[in-house]
Image (cartoon, rainbow, N blue to C red):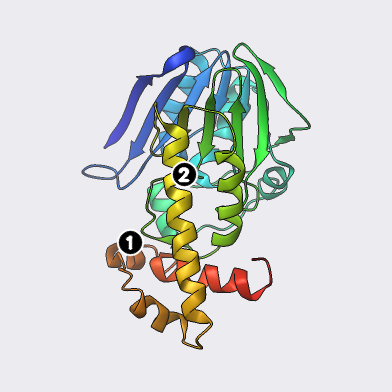
């Protein structure tokens, strides 16, 4: 099953919801966005035909990646090769996508393969038809993660910084403490529209991001308070009565789980980054 749905947002911004599965509804979908010949992220490579058509139809002239994960960069190489469109991102994104890198079987099934591509580092604000677009480094979900901000329109393209008010699981390589700092950076901005790559919010976007920040700060604090008593990470999970999505955990070979969140908070604190 292939899903490609188009949505209109304010200021002429268009969002494209992309999803793929062998049968039945996709397990996950992802959005890419276009405005004024700009494309934010490129979707999963399983949806390459649709992504190429989106870039061509909207006369995209520049692509900006929020980070290297395959559901965001998956069609960058193909669009660049076929249409000659330059791809921009954080310098760490360029380093990661310079050569092939391994992904787990579940990632390859849900999103598709990864293909190396040339990424030009963003050195400063970019002028667009919607005014200046700022690039803000927001690590935590990934080391190279960035958010794109249109201050004159009050719009934030948040990549995977938001996802939802409450997070039910974490990737093994995520850093909860660093993500909290990134959320604080973006919550301090003046914006209304939060264009998340999986869960966009047309209105009250800043409040939605604040909700996630409050949730993570509370969770982080409770985890560290328990850890200081000398209990193990698994005991913390039980004490705090956290719940595991076992389908997700086992489907993802343990790479995605709520226990990973506990481990992430403890790791961050133990390394003295609190």
> What label sits on residue 190 in the rendered view?
none
Q: Mark 1 and mark 2 in contact? Answer it, CB < 8 Å.
A: no
Count the marks.
2
Q: Position of residue 122 (x, y in %)?
A: 74, 33
Residue underneath mark 1: 248
In the displayed structure, 155 sits above or below 167; it is: above
In the displayed structure, 171 sits above or below 262; it is: above
Task: Indicate which label's residue lies in the foreground, 1 or 2.
Answer: 2
In the displayed structure, 82 sits above or below 115; it is: above
Q: Indicate the quadrant where residue 87 lies.
A: top right
Q: Position of residue 237 (x, y in %)?
A: 38, 76
* Disc 2 secondary structure class: helix
Q: Position of residue 45 (x, y in %)?
A: 47, 39
Q: Position of residue 164 (x, y in %)?
A: 39, 46
* Disc 1 secondary structure class: helix
Looking at the image, residue 17 sits to the left or right of residue 13; the answer is left
- Crowding near the residue tagged with mark 1, few <14, some 14–19, many ≥20 C-alpha atoms within 10 Å: some
Residue underneath mark 2: 210
- Residue at (65, 48) in percent of width and height: 144
- Crowding near the residue tagged with mark 2, few <14, some 14–19, many ≥20 C-alpha atoms within 10 Å: some
Farthest right residue in view: 123
- Residue at (57, 13) in percent of width and height: 36
User: Is residue 140 visible to the viewer in this orientation of the structure?
Assistant: no
Q: Nearer the viewer, residue 118 or 205?
A: 205
The C terminus sits in image quarter? bottom right
- Residue at (58, 20) in percent of width and height: 38
| Cα–Cα gap, marks 1 and 2 | 26 Å
User: Is residue 89 visible to the viewer in this orientation of the structure?
Assistant: yes
- Residue at (50, 86) in percent of width and height: 229
The N terminus sits in image quarter? top left
In the displayed structure, 26 sits above or below 251; it is: above
Farthest left residue in view: 24
């Amino acid at each position: 099953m292939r899903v490609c749905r188009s949505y209109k947002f304010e200021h002429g911004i268009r969002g494209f919801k992309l999803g793929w599965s062998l049968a039945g509804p996709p397990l996950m979908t992802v959005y890419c966005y276009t405005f004024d010949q700009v494309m934010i992220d490129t979707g999963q490579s399983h949806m390459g035909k649709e992504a190429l058509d989106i870039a061509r139809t909207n006369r995209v002239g520049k692509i900006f990646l929020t980070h290297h994960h395959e559901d965001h960069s998956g069609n960058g190489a193909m669009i660049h090769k076929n249409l000659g469109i330059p791809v921009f991102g954080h310098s760490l994104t360029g380093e990661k996508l310079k050569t092939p890198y391994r992904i787990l079987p579940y990632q390859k099934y849900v999103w598709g393969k990864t293909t190396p591509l040339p990424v030009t580092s963003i050195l400063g604000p970019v002028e667009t038809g919607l005014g200046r677009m700022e690039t803000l480094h927001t690590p935590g979900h990934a080391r190279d993660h960035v958010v794109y901000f249109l201050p004159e329109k009050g719009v934030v393209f948040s990549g995977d910084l938001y996802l939802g008010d409450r997070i039910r699981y974490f990737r093994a390589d995520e850093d909860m403490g660093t993500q909290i700092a990134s959320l604080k950076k973006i919550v301090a901005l003046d914006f209304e529209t939060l264009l998340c790559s999986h869960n966009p919010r047309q209105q009250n976007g800043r409040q939605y991001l604040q909700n996630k920040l409050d949730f993570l700060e509370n969770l982080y604090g409770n985890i560290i308070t328990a850890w200081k008593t000398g209990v193990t990470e698994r005991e913390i999970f039980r004490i705090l009565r956290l719940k595991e999505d076992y389908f997700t955990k086992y489907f993802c070979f343990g790479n995605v789980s709520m226990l990973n969140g506990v481990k992430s908070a403890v790791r961050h604190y133990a390394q003295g980054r609190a």
